[in-house]
């Protein structure tokens, strides 16, 4: 029982990280990136290329992955978001999905279809108390989530950049009129969003193996979390992620593991029927 | 109707009817049959997505529900003639269950709930093995049979499906011209303005969604009994995205566009098989290019042609 809670929370932390990446982009340009899962997959594979293929030290592999993800995030923005600025969100959903297909197949060409494993950056014997085993990697996942959550909170509320992001989100044209470097702000948001999903990929790969098709379902879980927590809501994303991780772990154990992936959607549909804007509400509303 | 309107229509019909005279390759005809079935499903998708502007990734699931209802019913010994009705009943039920609570949701939420619905349907098909055959699917499904009469061979099926597609397209065109069709367009343009003008937007969305599901259900019924083999892969989330891109590439809101998009994107992967994995890379980039450069899809490019010709 206690073990299920720990496993569920570790899984949930990864979902929360995917959702935090989505949130950064959503909070700046009000767009939901349906290729976030594929960015995560790229992060995992770039990490593997660095740490396994080229045998870089783990810290260097992580750093180079994050750098690569920042660049990928900016390229992604230029290809998928810029040409469609001001067009219906519906079309942006489709371009991000199409970009996800492109990334997934490029990964298949570059890295092949076989699953690969990435070692964890932390080593050591697992902690045990009261019959519950917590591996060092799980502990590392919890710490990473906590640090990122804190940094993101401080960045959004306490820094100049956070304010620029809010202004851009509220009204792009007015923000530009008052001299805010709108394009640069958006580029940074996409870069950070991609970095967060890259970190999620680096954290997932040691637990499940990395394969080019892993992004689809993890990306969808990130949206389910965003929906449960309310798009753009920081505490909502974390609580929603942990909640979903627990639901899946307990559902797989006590109901049926065949329908593991269905629980997320069932919970999401139930939440939306009851609260059409998510459990914790949405940060912004539709403009007329 | 002027020459400009009926000429492409007549040309399309003649080409469609002549194809079996050119090729007797069963593989080609079977591929065309699947293309026609996909075109019917995309015409259905066009109601909710092209005309009302509601994103819908559940269409493949409705296609699958129709196909599996038919496959299971005929294999259990029910006469074929009951299956279109059964498929419609099941699909309408499912579309109301999904549509009633979710159609008032905004874009992203609706996209997610329809993806979720499709995934749940797929998981049920995959894991309810004794009835659905699981991942290996259902084989040797009895063919179309109306009191002892039924099409034999691929070519007869081809002509039957062409007739059904023609009916589906003309019904869609009639609905577009009706007050319901105008209500759909009004809802797409501005929900608030439509409500102000007395359009019940929730009801309009639900009707469009259900009509679309019925199209998919009937196409699924014909799929099961003309291809005679079904498996979960044909109705997965990937298929739902493919159906959506057929609509976008062909041209949202345009009936010829739906048909061009569906037929084109069903045949293209077979024609470009030598590209291997690169096909999907190019396909994704192509979809982005169409959305960015030609938001009205290929149909809008075709309608621009006469204007260019006239300007010269």
Image: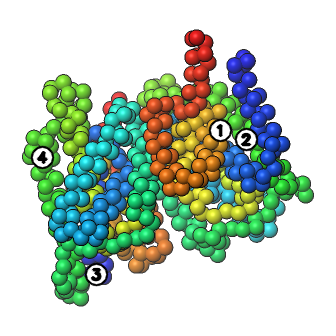
Give the residue pinned by disc 1: B259
Give yes or no for contact between labels 3 and 4 (Cβ–Cβ under 8 Å).
Answer: no
Side of A115 relative to B153 (left or right):
left
**Of marks 1 and 4, the one in the foreground:** 1
User: Which quadrant would the N terminus of chain B be assigned to in this image?
Assistant: top right
| SS at badge 2 | helix
| Mark 3 residue crowding within 10 angstroms, few (<14) / some (14–19) / many (20+) | few
Give yes or no for contact between labels 2 and 1 (Cβ–Cβ under 8 Å).
Answer: yes
**Of marks 1 and 3, the one in the foreground:** 1
Position of residue B68 measured from the top left corner of the image (x, y, whole percent):
67, 62
**Of marks 3 and 2, the one in the foreground:** 2
User: Which quadrant would the C terminus of chain B be assigned to in this image?
Assistant: top right
Rounded to the nearest whole Å, what is the CA distance between mark 2 and mark 1?
Answer: 9 Å
Rounded to the nearest whole Å, what is the CA distance between mark 1 and mark 4?
Answer: 51 Å
Furthest toward the bottom, the residue is A131
The numbered dot on residue A3 is 3
The numbered dot on residue A157 is 4
| SS at badge 3 | helix
């Amino acid at each position: 029982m206690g073990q299920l809670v720990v496993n569920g929370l570790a899984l949930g932390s990864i979902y929360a990280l995917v959702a935090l990446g989505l949130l950064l982009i959503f909070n700046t340009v009000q767009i939901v990136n349906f290729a976030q899962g594929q960015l995560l997959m790229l992060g995992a594979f770039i990490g593997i290329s660095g740490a396994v293929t080229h045998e870089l030290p783990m810290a260097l592999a992580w750093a180079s992955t994050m750098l690569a993800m920042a660049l990928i995030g900016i390229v992604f923005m230029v290809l998928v978001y810029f040409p469609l600025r001001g067009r219906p969100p519906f079309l942006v959903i489709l371009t991000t999905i199409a970009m996800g297909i492109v990334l997934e197949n490029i990964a298949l060409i570059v890295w092949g279809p076989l699953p690969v494993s990435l070692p964890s950056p932390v080593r050591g014997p697992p902690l045990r108390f009261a019959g519950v085993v917590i591996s060092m990697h799980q502990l590392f996942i919890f710490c990473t989530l906590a640090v990122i959550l804190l940094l993101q909170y401080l960045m959004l509320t306490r820094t100049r950049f956070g304010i620029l992001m809010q202004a851009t989100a509220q009204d792009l044209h007015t923000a530009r009129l008052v001299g805010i470097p709108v394009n640069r702000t958006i580029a940074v948001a996409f870069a950070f969003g991609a970095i967060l999903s890259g970190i999620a990929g680096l954290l997932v790969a040691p637990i499940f193996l990395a394969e080019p098709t892993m992004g689809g379902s993890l990306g969808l879980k990130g949206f389910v979390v965003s929906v449960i927590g309310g798009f753009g809501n920081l505490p909502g994303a974390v609580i929603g992620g942990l909640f979903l991780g627990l639901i899946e772990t307990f559902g797989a154990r006590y109901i049926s593991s065949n329908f593991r992936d269905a629980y997320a959607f069932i919970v999401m549909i139930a939440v939306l029927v009851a609260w059409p804007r998510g459990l914790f509400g949405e940060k912004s509303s539709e403009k007329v | 109707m002027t020459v400009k309107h009926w000429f492409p229509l007549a040309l399309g019909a003649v080409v469609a009817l002549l194809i079996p005279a050119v090729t007797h390759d069963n593989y080609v005809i079977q591929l065309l049959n699947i293309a026609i079935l996909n075109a019917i499903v995309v015409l259905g998708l066009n109601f909710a997505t092209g005309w009302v502007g509601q994103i819908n990734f559940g269409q493949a699931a409705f296609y699958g529900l129709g196909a599996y209802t038919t496959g299971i019913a005929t294999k259990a010994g029910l006469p074929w003639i009951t299956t279109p009705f059964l498929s419609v009943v099941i699909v309408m039920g499912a579309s109301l269950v999904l549509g009633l609570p979710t159609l008032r949701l905004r874009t992203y939420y609706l996209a997610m709930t329809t993806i979720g619905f499709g995934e749940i349907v797929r998981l049920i098909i995959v894991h309810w093995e004794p009835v659905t055959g699981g991942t290996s699917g259902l084989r040797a499904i009895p063919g179309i049979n109306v009191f002892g009469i039924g099409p034999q061979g691929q070519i007869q099926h081809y002509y039957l499906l062409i007739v059904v597609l023609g009916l589906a397209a003309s019904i869609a065109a009639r609905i577009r011209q009706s007050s319901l069709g105008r209500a759909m367009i009004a809802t797409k343009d501005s929900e608030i303005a439509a409500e102000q003008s007395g359009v019940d937007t929730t009801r309009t969305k639900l009707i469009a969604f259900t009509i679309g599901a019925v199209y998919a259900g009937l196409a699924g019924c014909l799929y099961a009994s003309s291809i005679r083999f079904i498996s979960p892969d044909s109705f997965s989330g990937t298929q739902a995205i493919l159906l959506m891109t057929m609509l976008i590439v062909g041209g949202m809101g345009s009936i010829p566009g739906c048909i061009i998009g569906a037929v084109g994107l069903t045949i293209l992967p077979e024609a470009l098989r030598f590209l291997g994995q690169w096909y999907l890379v190019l396909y994704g980039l192509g979809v982005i290019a169409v959305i960015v450069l030609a938001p009205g899809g290929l149909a809008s490019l075709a309608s621009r042609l006469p204007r260019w010709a006239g300007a010269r």
